[in-house]
Image (cartoon, rainbow, N blue to C red):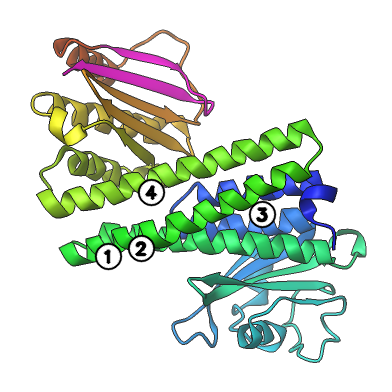
Amino acid sequence: MPTIGVYDPDKLKELLQAVLLIESDLSLPVVLRRVVKAACALTDAKYGAIGVLDSSGEKLSEFITEGLSDEEIRLIGNKPIGRGILGALITDAVPLRTANLPGHEKSYGFPLHHPKMLTFLGVPIKVSGTVFGNIYLTEKEQGLEFTNGDEEIVISLAQAAGIAIENSRLHSRVRELTLTEDRARIARDLHDEVIQRIFAVGLSLQSMTRLIDSDQVRGRLQDSIDELDETIKQIRTTIFALETTQRLGQSSARSKILTVVSEAVQPLGFEPMVTFTGPIDAFVEEPVLSNLLSVLREALSNIARHAQATRVDINISATQTLILKVEDDGVGLKTDGRVGMGIKNMRDRARQLGGDLTFDISHLGGVQLLWTADL
């Protein structure tokens, strides 16, 4: 069968964009919602869902839908638990495709008020070799059947989703666990499992570049590979933070910075990406550290209140100068020229330490804050 990379560069580009999107957030509910939304878009399916298996692995504990209105969901009533053709996917854990869902031998029927659904495609999501749940897609546009190409695309998406889910679970456990041995074990898991799998995906994508004739698509593919490299850097930062916390408890500069970031997750609605460059724990001491934490806390608070952002990237580097860079994809800078007390205080803190505060347009589309201090 022809590969997607050679014969359908548009679909390949959409798939890569979907993979990067679901990898960009560590919150599991957001990841799952993005997966089902991307699956519908990539296959032109009117309806989609992700069924998450319970601890027994025999029935569904969660069912996240796409394409149904709140009123339709209310009228349908109880969510599926995994009977009929949904149960067949749980039992067999292999892709399943049919052009006649009601006529399938495993079909269980639909409840009252359920929309008509004829075509069907189901693909399992595996995390560390174990089935986590399934992607369900129905009603391909214009009454068409789902194709072999659709199935291949959703299988690739499910593989990426498995990595994202595993990454999300590990990060959630990092925030919850405090025992030294658990942190060390999670750091090993992140390094030995997650990083290696993302690296393998990057190598696979790299090998596909020679199969693509379009310079534009090849460039987009390289951009996606670069994004995966950046994700690996982010995970390495988390590993370093875990190891630092293990050695030094909660007293290191890195651990205090990560604590401020974790406090901002709830008001932001997502987890910022943090990278460190240079010997942060060796160079950043008082009074620079306390001022840095105050500025970072104020910057994240401003983003949560005003930016309407869905992504925040934080980079902190230490050489002879401490540089804090905070970027978001929000609505941008105000143009009325007024400066609030929070910004004035951040600028004063910088200048007292021989640095400065500047704002610019971020490459993400929102605001870039650059705060410096002399070390």
Nearer the observer, 184 or 347: 184
Q: Residues within 10 Å of mark 3 (few under 14, many from 20)?
A: many
User: Who is closer to the viewer here, 69 or 172?
Assistant: 172
139 is higher (above) or lower (below) than 338:
below
Q: Residue at x 80, y 35 (%)?
A: 214
**Is 341 located above or below residue 153 in the figure?**
above
Q: Which residue is mark 4?
A: 235
Query: Which of the marked residues, 3 or 4, is nearer the chain's N terminus?
Result: 3
Picture coordinates of residue 263 (x, y %)?
27, 45
Q: Is residue 302 above or below residue 141?
A: above
**What is the CA distance from the residue labelled 4 to the residue labelled 1?**
14 Å
The residue wearing badge 2 is 189
Q: Which residue is mark 1?
A: 185
Q: What residue do we see at 30% from left, 51% from top?
A: 239
Horizontal side, residue 21 vs residue 189: left or right? right
Q: What span is in magenta?
A: 356-375
Q: Main secondary structure of the magenta part?
A: strand
**Disc 2 from disc 3: Cα separation:** 27 Å
Taking the spot 44% from the left edge, 46% from the top edge, the residue there is 232
